[in-house]
Image (cartoon, rainbow, N blue to C red):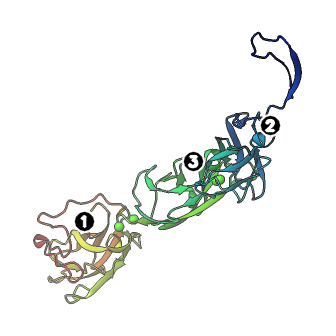
Amino acid sequence: MRKIVVSVTDCGNPPLRATSSATVFVNLLDLNDNDPIFQNLPFVAEVLEGTPAGVSVYQVVAIDLDEGLNGLVSYRMQVGMPRMDFLINSSSGVVTTTTELDRERIAQYQLRVVATDAGTPTKSSTSTLTIRVLDVNDETPTFFPAVYNVSVSEDVPRDFRVVWLNCTDNDVGLNAELSYFITGGNVDGKFSVGYRDAVVRTVVNLDRETTAAYTLILEAIDNGPVGQRRSGTATVFVTVLDVNDNRPIFLQSSYEASVPEDIPEGHSIVQLKATDADEGEFGRVWYRILHGDHGNNFRIHVSDGLLMRGPKPLDREQDSSHVLIVEAYNHDLGPMRSSVRVRRAAGQLQSQAAGSPASPPALPSGLGRGHGWTAQSHQWVPAGQGCR
Ligand SMILES: [Ca+2]
Ligand SMILES: [Ca+2]
Ligand SMILES: [Ca+2]
Ligand SMILES: [Ca+2]
């Protein structure tokens, strides 16, 4: 309300200078000339994920300097958000969740907030409310795949990389920082896993003949708050593959036999037997007479070790003593061999084991490698069938 004093003069000629005054009261009407103005910008709220629906997370405030309806502010959110996970109270400006927040789904919201007055015409302002969703350790470390099948040769060196495990945790920060442990199946501590890199390695040498397979249980643990840490497990099946690292061992340190000098060709003299701890071909034992059978008096079954009389008859009067060296060996003709020494005296045949392992004798010239070999110069026959 304003008070104005008014004076008037007429326009006659001559003017009559009559003056009068009056007091006029003027009621100035407000024009809607102010926008609502947001306070305390920028709007940033931080909310823990897992916060349920219906929780207030922020209050926006806008002030409008006009009077009455021209200054009456109401709030709304612009449509077009990816999801309407929040509501705003139109009169109070309080922002409330409408769903449980999940940082792994949406980690940050940018909400467009509009403040509008009730004037004619209306005026409005727009601002952004940033809501950051803070991580909670609600994700479990997960191996993918969860089961690994690996094979390693038993002769791999120490610190050999066996397998790398893939594990993820969808949280962030410490909640996703993983440490790895072997929690089961690590017989004799043969394996280790990188605390951080999830690589399984050998710690010491393996031996298939001792342990041919392992079932390792691996665990990943995140670094969330104490008491809220989460873990996941994986299984690693390790098959240890054989190499030929065992030589045939004769079951007896010596063999003795007594036979008449007139036994016929092919007649059994003594059964030799050696075993080999390897598997398959690496563990199959073959036999041969290395030395001493100068007169072709003997032969031995190449695969079952039976020593027999050979093509030439025994003659005690001509040859009163014999020394035979019999070797047990593997098919690959590698260094894995043992031998026994056999001696015949006074009409009887005796044998003694030579110290094992024997130094590997030189291979006969012309002796091939591989299956079905034949050493013609020593009258050897195909493996697994014949005799010498
Ligand atoms: Ca986690
Ligand atoms: Ca989380
Ligand atoms: Ca062997
Ligand atoms: Ca072996």
Q: Does the image show residue 330?
A: yes
Circle 3 residues within 10 Å: few <14, some 14–19, many ≥20? some
| Closer to the eye: label 2 or 1 | 2
Answer above or below: position of 297 versus 357: below
Front label number (2 vs 3): 2
Q: Is residue 259 visible?
A: no
Residue 279 appears left or right of 368? right
**Real-space Cα separation, disc 2 to disc 1, in angstroms:** 107 Å
- Left or right, 188 with reference to 271: right
Question: Is the C-beta separation of discs 2 and 1 under 8 Å?
Answer: no
Which numbered circle lies on residue 195? 3
The numbered disc on residue 67 is 2
Do the numbered discs 2 and 3 sit on residues whose CB atoms are within 8 Å? no
Counting residues from the start of the chain, the first of labels 3 and 1 encountered is 3
Q: Residue at x 72, y 56 (%)?
A: 50
**For the residues marked 3 and 1, what is the alpha-carbon distance in whole angstroms?**
44 Å
Tell me which numbered mark, 2 or 1, is placed earlier along the sequence.
2
Q: Amino acid at mark 3?
A: Tyr
Q: Between residue 24 and residue 170, name the one nearer to us.
A: 24
Nearest to N terminus: mark 2 or mark 3: 2
- The residue nearer to you, when weighing 218 against 326, is 218
Q: Residue 340 in the image: x percent, y percent? A: 32, 68
**Is 355 situated above or below 179?**
below
| Residue to which mark 1 is pinned | 333
The quarter of the displayed image where residue 86 is located: bottom right
**In terms of depth relative to the viewer, which is nearer, 52 or 30?**
30
